[in-house]
Image (cartoon, helix red, strand yellow):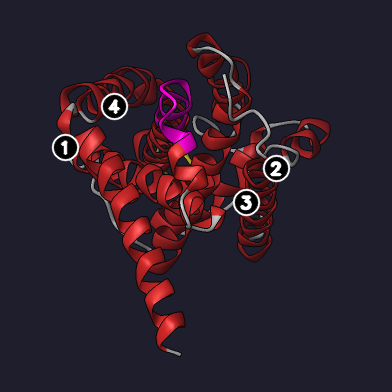
Amino acid sequence: MSQQMNMRSLYFTAFKSIITKEINRFTRIWVQTLVPPAISMTLYFLIFGNLVGKRIGEMGGVSYMEFIAPGLIMMSVITASYSNVASSFFSAKFQRNLEELIVAPVPHYVMIAGYVGGGVARGLCVGLIVTLVAMFFVDISLHHAGLVAITVLLTSILFALGGLINAVFAKSYDDISIVPTFVLTPLTYLGGVFYSLSLLPSFWQGVSQLNPVVYMINVFRYGFLGYADMSVPMSIAVMISFCVGLWLVAYYLISRGIGLRT
């Protein structure tokens, strides 16, 4: 029993060390990691929410700026969570620091949890900052705080895992930007951030259901406004399924040592 407790203490220490390193990493360069999302979202609110929104009027029973606010917050969380793990994990792999961690007497799931935890921490920080920015433009009200918390946590975990998988396969720093540019950005912009799915023809509504970002923004918007284009329980189930699936993929890749040497 005491040996098991010692091993658990060792694993927790390893997890705490990794996540502390990850948090220190992005907070040390906060001007590059935390400030840009706030500036970008301010421009989105000014251009799309204020200037364009006045011409559009209401959407989903609220002003256009209120409608896009949850989507913009979620978009910043997605980008921050993904980029933090992708860049950090690949840097560790490129600098050969990862090999020392792999041979250490620590389970692979602890290592994954540490890096993912760092991505979640950055995603939550950025999400909080963007929410504070949004409060200068719209009145933020919570219809269901629990759903907001669950959604932002699941989304951060999902895209942090996605960033880790991207870093595993990346062979250069240029490869880190391929997925965000050609996959992440289209999925986000077509995920219902700036429009309601009800505006789309039935065929494109069906196509949109293949986009996982749609489910995240759907639940997140419901948590703020009480408005949803799709079933909330189904959306949560989809997010959990993606998280479990990506976790299993990440664990398989790291346990087999696939792509861990540049």
Q: Are marks 3 and 4 in contact (CB under 8 Å)?
A: no
According to the picture, the residue beneath numbered tag 2 turns out to be 256
Relative depth, front residue between 61 and 207: 207
**Which of the 4 image quarters holds residue 244?**
bottom right
The residue at 72%/35% (across/down) is 208
Which stretch did the figure color magenta?
88-99
> Element under label 1?
loop
Tag in front: 3 or 1? 3
> Outermost residue toward the bottom?
1
In the rendered image, which residue does mark 1 sit on?
136
Q: Is residue 117 at least partly visible in the picture?
A: yes
Along the polypeptide, which appears first: circle 2 or circle 4? 4
User: Where does residue 122 sit, x and y in percent of width and height?
Assistant: 31, 41
Q: Quadrant of the C terminus?
A: top right
Q: CA distance from mark 3 to mark 1?
A: 37 Å
Q: What is the magenta segment's predominant secondary structure? A: helix
**Between marks 1 and 4, how big is the CA–CA gap?**
15 Å
**Of the image marks 2 and 3, the number of the one nearer the N terminus:** 3
Query: Which residue position is annotated with label 3?
Result: 247
Query: From the viewer's perspective, is residue 129 above or below residue 43?
Result: below
User: In front: mark 2 or mark 4?
Assistant: 2
Residue at numbered disc 4:
37
